[in-house]
Every structure is written in C-alpha cells, then in structure tokens.
C-alpha cells in the first residue's frame, strides 16, 4: 500500500514540476474530489498537502511548502522548523487518510484524518482569502482515540 501511495505522490510531484497549467489544475481538483475532498480551493489545497506529506520525502514537502505557503509564512516559522515538525509527525503517524469533513468553506477546511497509528487527528487548513489563495496554515488541533 505504501508503495502505491509513493508512486502516486511521485507522479503528483512530477506533474507539478513540469509546470502548472490550467489542465493540471483541473486534474488536481478532479483527483481531490475523487478522493473525497470538498470541491473548494481549501479542499484542493488540503489534498495537495496530504499528498506531499504522505510522500515520506522531505524534498517533496519542502517544494510543496515553498510553492504553496502564503508570502511571509516562512518568516513566521522557518522551513527547518516546519520540516522538523514533519519528521516528528511522520514518525508517529505515517500516512494520513481523510475520514471526515467537519467544516468546509472556500478558504477554510476542518477534517479528521487517520494515520497508520490508527488514531484520528483533527486538522484545520486555512488559505489566504486573497488570490492566489496560498496556504496560510495547517494546524493539528487534537488527537482522538482509536
């Protein structure tokens, strides 16, 4: 299962690296909807974040953050701090799978996801309301039981 996810993630990164065209954007939106994410900018961004996160590759995560974080976000919290947090989370929970949409609007999304540790986690994704609607924050709010 991990191998299939890694192949999918590598394919996603290659598509992103090739350049972002309107067709690529529509493809990403379609993939996000197919995977159960809301048909909103926040749903698509959260899907992309999870795809990068589940790649188990710091370079993919760093590339995603550099491309999609709101301007100034790396001044508030450095890339090294963000990658250190990623390593700790990955070590404890591994792959993430969407289990529930709690709240959804165009630029904010609250979801439950389950990790390989079989624990549900509540995540909040917030996007900048100004175009191009970059990622403002991802917050792990709480841990839930099995």
Image (cartoon, rainbow, N blue to C red):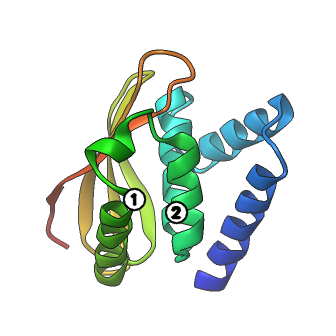
Q: Is mark 2 on a helix, strand or loop?
A: helix
Count residues near mark 1 (Cα–Cα under 10 Å), then give few for <14, some for 14-19, many for 20+: some
- Taking the view exactly as shown, the residue that stands out farthest to the top is 130
Residue 107 coordinates in the image, percent (x, y) = 41, 24
Does the CB distance between marks 1 and 2 fall below 8 Å? no
Q: Is residue 28 left or right of residue 75?
A: right
Looking at the image, tell me whether mark 1 or mark 2 is earlier in sequence order. 2
Identity of the residue drawn at 47% across and 32% down: 42
Residue 74 shows up from this direction: yes
Mark 1–mark 2 distance (CA, rounded to whole Å): 10 Å
Residue 17 coordinates in the image, percent (x, y) = 77, 54
Q: In this view, does 73 lie to the left or right of 24?
A: left
Q: In this view, does 104 lie to the left or right of 11?
A: left
Quadrant of the image containing the N terminus: bottom right
Identity of the residue drawn at 29% across and 77% down: 88
Give the image quarter of residue 145: bottom left
Give the image quarter of residue 128: top left
* Nearer to me, 72 or 29: 72
Q: Mark 2 points at which residue?
A: 61
Q: Compared to 52, does 134 lie above or below? A: above
Q: Mark 1 points at which residue?
A: 79
Residue 114 is tagged as none
Q: Is residue 63 left or right of residue 127?
A: right
Question: Which mark is in front, 1 or 2?
Answer: 1
* Nearer to me, 46 or 84: 84
Q: Is mark 1 on a helix, strand or loop?
A: helix
Q: Compared to 118, does 14 lie above or below? A: above
């Amino acid at each position: 299962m991990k191998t299939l996810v890694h192949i999918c993630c590598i394919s996603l990164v290659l598509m992103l690296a090739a350049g972002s065209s309107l067709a690529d954007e529509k493809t990403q939106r379609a993939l996000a909807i197919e995977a159960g994410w809301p048909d909103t900018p926040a749903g698509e961004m959260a899907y992309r974040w999870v795809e990068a996160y589940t790649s188990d590759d710091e370079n993919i995560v760093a590339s995603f953050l550099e491309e999609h974080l709101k301007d100034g976000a790396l001044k508030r919290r450095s890339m090294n701090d963000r990658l250190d947090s990623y390593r700790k989370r990955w070590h404890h929970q591994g792959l993430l799978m969407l289990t529930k949409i709690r709240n959804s609007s165009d630029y904010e999304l609250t979801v439950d996801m389950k990790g390989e540790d079989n624990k549900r986690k509540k995540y909040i994704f917030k996007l900048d309301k100004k175009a191009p609607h970059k990622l403002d924050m991802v917050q792990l709010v709480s841990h839930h039981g099995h």
